[in-house]
Amino acid sequence: MPEGDTILRTARTLHRALAGRVVVGFDTAYAHLSHVNDDHPIAGRTVVEVRAVGKHLLISFSGDLTLRTHMRMSGSWHIYRPGERWQRAPSSMRILIANEEFMAVAFNVHDARFYAARELDRSGVLTSLGPDLLSAGFDATEALARMRARPEAEVAEVVLDQRVVAGAGNVFKSEALFVARINPFLPVADLDDARLQELIDATRSLMAANVTPTSRDAVVTSFGFRRTTRRSSPDQRLWVYNRAGEPCRRCGTPIASRKQGPHARMTFWCPTCQPGAHDRGARDRRPTR
């Protein structure tokens, strides 16, 4: 599933393929984007830049027009050479941007809209976000203050709240909490500033490790599997995520899992490495193999 690391890698790749080049073709499956294109044609404009803000991807065109997309759970952007066979069905195409050398195709991207700069600022879509975990200008003090503003919330839910910190999704939530040895179901109020800072640092470190120059940031948008353990074996790439019932890589305790929060997102954790009195009996409901 796309998280901040995926969005940043995709933005870098699209920037390499599109920035500074004139658009020669635009197509979309969405009527609201087609209407903008009818009134303000995209073809003939130059792509100024492509950048990521949390889980949002922004493609800026000359003439004060920006396309914002959010991949949700299953969306993706691909880059192809003219005439190259697509890796997804044409019926999944939602947006296509072409120049003389490359074609950028968005598949199953369900959240997309054009904005003028002033409209984007006024929309609140980006201004409501917390500090971007992968930004070079990340404000750790602000992130900590936003966490503290939700004292009764379970810490795993706070990590996912894009208004607190932007970019982390369900995978990095579980992985960072494990690395920081924090029980996912503890309320924020039960953790001191030092422990919350450890969690912020762990989340940033794990995400950054997946967007280094060695993460295949060429003009491709297939990046392989996400890794958090730094282990070379493909079947040992994650600590706890999607490993319910399997032994913890640290202590051997079976990994537990449980749906959490209003959206019932699955959380994975080790009951031994991440103990907590506020797990609401989750240890008793560990999956059996």
Image: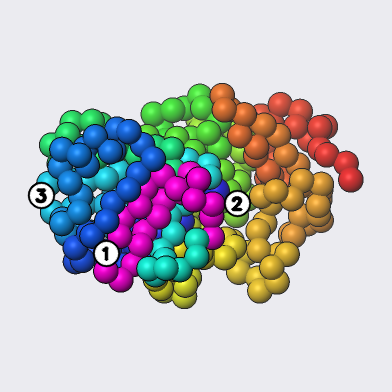
- Image quarter (top left, top right, bottom left or bottom right) of the C terminus: top right
Secondary structure under tag 1 reads: loop
Residue at the far front in the pictured view:
83
Query: Residue 224: image x %, image y %?
Result: 57, 65
Q: Are marks 3 and 2 in contact (CB under 8 Å)?
A: no
Q: Residues within 10 Å of mark 1 (few under 14, many from 20)?
A: many
- List the residue tagged with mark 2: 175
Q: Is residue 158 above or below residue 79?
A: above
The reply to whether the magenta stretch includes residue 256 is no
- What residue is rendered at 35% in x and 52% in y? 96
Q: Mark 3 or mark 2, which is nearer to you? A: 3
Q: How many marks?
A: 3
- List the residue tagged with mark 1: 99
Secondary structure under tag 3 reads: loop
Q: Mark 1 or mark 3, which is nearer to you? A: 1
Q: Which residues are magenta?
A: 87-108
Front residue of 93/139: it is 93
Q: Is residue 38 above or below residue 189?
A: below
Say left or right for 244 vs 229.
Answer: right
- List the residue tagged with mark 3: 63
